[in-house]
């Protein structure tokens, strides 16, 4: 489905339910980490090239703005290079880096007045944003598949609170308890926001018949 | 105890179903449509079954978004290099200052 409401028949890749094949070790990563800990500039460049896309994508999805996402990517890597000696290998390096990135994004959002005021607000968006459900009537439904690009656009258009929880849980694979601790909300709140986010996305993605273009005779 | 543990699945109403749906998704690996306790209910309520199917599709497609497709601009790495260079220069200056002070003190 595109942004205008037409569903395209693209079948998404279906990963194993509940199995996130993520954060696999990357060839040469361990050596690059050790070299970077010794201050090797080439190793920094290697680590940057290995992880720049993931870090940038997380920032872009969470901040919804290219320039802010690039600044945050820069911050995340600078932070990484300054703190790399504190990486002990207890989790995958990419997991550690992604968590560091998410925390930096959230910290920045909290620092900005509007977000501190509205972190609760964005976590609990106003009634206008709440997806409407009416079990008495038949909803238009998705046609069994969702185009990746359409979903990406719809996610970008979600209210910030919904978007944050959706990206962290459904895209990044964080658990509700982890999200709750990152966002300083309850696990129940995280579950509920995720559900509302998915409902909102459904509303945005489902097929809507296009209005017929006015004919000459109708003008 | 979660909300979904108290459900009477045999007498579940669509409104109640929606209330417990976030919990059902969170506790069942996201595969609500395959929950045997809901088989009869979903067969009886096609709107609820369609809702579950759609939400599962959205969640599954979202996982495919994990693979990033966009690179940041070259400017990002250039800025990082500049900052790191500045920091290492200032570290050298600091080290030299410390060493210089120590030598003077000697």
Image: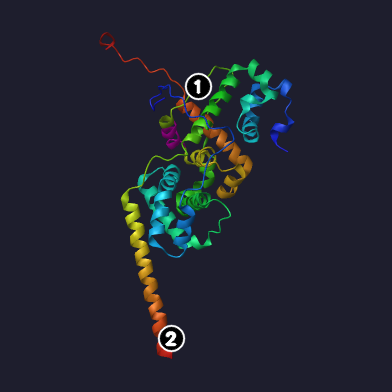
Return the residue at label 1.
A144
- Using residue B24 as the reference point, say whether residue B51 is left or right of it: left
Nearest the viewer among A158 and A179 is A179
Residue B102, disc: 2
Q: Is residue A12 magenta?
A: no
Point 41% across, 51% down: residue: A73
Position of the N terminus of chain A, as image quadrant, is top left
The span from disc 2 to disc 1 (Cα, nearest Å) is 73 Å
Tell which subunit mark 1 falls on: A
Q: Contact (CB < 8 A) between labels 2 and 1?
A: no
Residue A130 can be seen in this image: no
Residue A29, label in figure: none
Which stretch appears magenta? A151-158
Q: Which class describes the residues within 10 Å of circle 2: few (<14), some (14-19), or many (20+)?
A: few
For disc 2, the chain is B
Q: Residue B18 placed where, x, y %?
A: 62, 27
């Amino acid at each position: 489905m595109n942004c205008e409401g037409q569903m395209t028949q693209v079948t998404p890749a279906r990963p194993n339910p509940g199995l996130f094949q993520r954060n696999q070790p990357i060839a040469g990563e361990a050596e690059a980490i050790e070299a970077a800990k010794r201050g090797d500039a080439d190793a920094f460049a290697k680590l940057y090239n290995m992880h720049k896309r993931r870090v940038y994508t997380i920032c872009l999805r969470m901040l919804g703005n290219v320039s802010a996402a690039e600044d945050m990517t820069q911050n995340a890597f600078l932070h990484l290079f300054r703190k790399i000696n504190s990486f002990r290998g207890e989790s995958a390096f990419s997991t550690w880096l992604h968590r560091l990135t998410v925390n930096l994004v959230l910290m920045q959002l909290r620092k900005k007045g509007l977000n501190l005021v509205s972190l609760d607000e964005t976590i609990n968006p106003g009634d206008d944003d709440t997806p409407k459900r009416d079990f008495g009537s038949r909803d238009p439904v998705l046609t069994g598949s969702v185009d990746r690009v359409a979903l990406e656009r719809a996610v970008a258009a979600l209210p910030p609170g919904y978007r944050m929880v959706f990206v962290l849980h459904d895209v990044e694979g964080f658990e509700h308890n982890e999200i709750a601790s990152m966002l300083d909300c309850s696990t129940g709140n995280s579950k509920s926001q995720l559900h509302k986010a998915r409902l909102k996305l459904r509303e945005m993605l489902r097929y809507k018949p296009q209005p017929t273009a006015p004919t000459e005779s109708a003008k | 105890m979660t909300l979904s543990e108290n459900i009477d699945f045999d007498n579940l109403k669509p409104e109640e179903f929606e209330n417990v749906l976030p919990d059902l998704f969170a506790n069942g690996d996201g595969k609500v449509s395959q929950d045997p306790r809901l088989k009869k209910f979903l067969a009886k309520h096609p709107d609820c079954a369609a809702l579950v199917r759609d939400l599962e599709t959205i969640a599954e497609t979202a996982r495919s978004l994990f693979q990033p497709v966009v690179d940041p601009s070259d400017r990002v790495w250039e800025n990082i290099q500049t900052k790191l260079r500045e920091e290492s220069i200032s570290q050298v200056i600091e080290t030299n200052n410390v060493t210089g002070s120590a030598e003077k003190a000697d």
